[in-house]
Image (cartoon, helix red, strand yellow):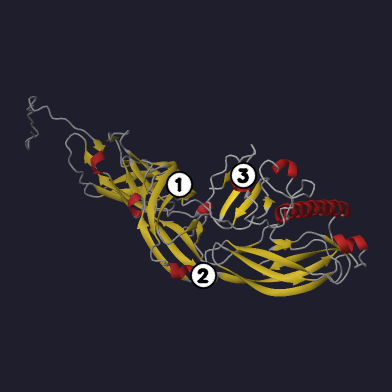
Amino acid sequence: MVDRAGQEVVKTFPESRWRFSAGLEIPEESVDLHLTSGAFLGDGARVTPLTEMEISGGLVFLETSTVPHFDCEVDVLFAGRSYTATARAGIWSVPVQAPLASGSLPLTWSVGCLQGQGQDLSNKEASVKWILVDGTGPQPVEILAPRPGSTLSGDVHEVKIIVEEVGGLDVQSLELNWRVEDFTTGDVIRSGDSPLSVTSGSIDGLRIELSGLMNLSSITDSMLVERMVVHISISGRDLAGNPVQGIDGKPAGTSISTWNMQWFQPEFTLSPSSLSYSRLLLEVGDSTSLTLEVENIGTLDGEIEVVFKSIELDGTESLIQRTTVIASAGSIGIVTLDWGPQRPGFQWVEATLANGQTASGPTIDVRVSEEPSLSEKVFGDVNPILGSVTGLLFVAILATLLLWMKRMTTNQGAKVAFDWDEFSSEIEDDHDDGGVDDLATRADPSQTESPLTSSPGSPEMPTQASEPETDWVMGSDGYWWYHDKVTNEWWYKDADGNIVKHP
């Protein structure tokens, strides 16, 4: 201390140990990043190109954590540009913008008002935030289900899509959009959307599988008589805010796949052998029946026009008939008509449907009609040699049959005389005609004994007078038969020569 006379005295206080520090710090926990779009990551953020951002923080003395009472500049460096912020009352902020090019860029800050003994004692390792600039949205690369080219019914279908996204998907924003349009006019008939979920586990990568449901049950069978198509697209974004693109980099919202819906309609087709003739050998003036089989492989009953033409070898065409064939779904319609070639030569018939399907019959050689020869008149189309052999066999069989019938008729109906040597021991007769008794004449019952009563082994006959003797007859079985009309009994001579009564 100094008085007015200039005298001074000095007193020290070594026990206080006061010190001075000019070190300033931007605390890590005081720094905040504000985004207009994009998503925060653990060490920064993911944004789209040209995204507006703002970074702010605090400024204090390191030793005492006191806020400086003076203004101090803070330097911010991002994407090759320097930004300057003024810290007033220890608070600063500065807007920054993401570059147009994609990439991972550091955002750093430091104290800029250092003079004399001033020092920036901020943690350099923590004084950075990594900003990932992502200018490309998720891109679908493959449709797993329904299979491309398949036909959809009015039902609920599971849709599986593979997308590519390096930065990461914003799963909550993903939706499957579908619409059913009229094939001809493009008018939207039905539409809808449903959420998509990630089934592959990771939200980033080159093959991320998404799954969702497409409910087409509002499309009834009665509506399917009109031709309709189904389009799907994906709405949503990645973590940077980029919208999901279309297939092959097309703009967002465009269709990524299209399927045909079931179309209930008749569909007619012809096979190579659909057309046939009833006759292949024709002459001018003859006719043959043409038969065409038209198959309806569609899902609806219908009809179609068919044109029949005859085509000659030189290319000359002649219209035979135009007609219409009707066929139910899944069945075959048959058309039959007559065709009579008017000119000779090689020619065939071709049938053409209204849808362009064609079928050709076999080629035939139409000949000029000629006067038939005698053999052709007799045998017709049959080979004369074969016809002659067949006729001879028939005549031989007929002659044999007639001979056999004649013999059977003669043996069965003829009356024969008995051999006297065979029956002389059985029949007693007083005739003096040289030993031959004509049994065709009747004997007097009072003078002649019945041959049955005189045959040894024959049954004993009644004693009353019997009817005059009847004839012995050679039967068709080879036995001699005798009929006694009085008793109405039949007798025959067996193989041993015994006369036996027929049972």
Task: Look at the numbered discs 1 and 2 and tell me whether their residues touch, using CB distance below 8 Å.
Answer: no
Residue matched to label 3: 454
List x then y, in percent, for residue 141: 50, 48
70 left or right, relative to 43: left
What number of labels is visible?
3
Q: CA distance from mark 3 to mark 1?
A: 123 Å
Query: Mark 3 or mark 1: which is in front?
Result: 3
Examine the rendered structure and indicate whether residue 7 appears above or below residue 397. above
Where on the picture, by quarter, is residue 288?
bottom right
In the rendered structure, which amino acid carries the disc numbered 3?
Ser
Eye-nearest disc, 3 or 2: 3
Taking the spot 74% from the left edge, 74% from the top edge, the residue there is 321
Q: Position of residue 210 (x, y in %)?
A: 40, 48
Please tell me which of labels 1 and 2 falls first in the chain.
1
Image quadrant in which the N terminus is located:
top left
How many neighbours does mark 1 have within 10 angstroms: few (below 14), some (14-19), or many (20 or more)? some
The residue lying at 80 percent from left, 47 percent from top is: 434
Q: Is residue 335 left or right of residue 140?
A: right
Residue under the image location 32 percent in, 46 percent down? 40
Q: Quadrant of residue 267?
A: bottom right
The reply to whether residue 149 is in sight is: yes
Which residue in the protein does label 1 denote? 162
Q: Which residue is mark 2?
A: 186
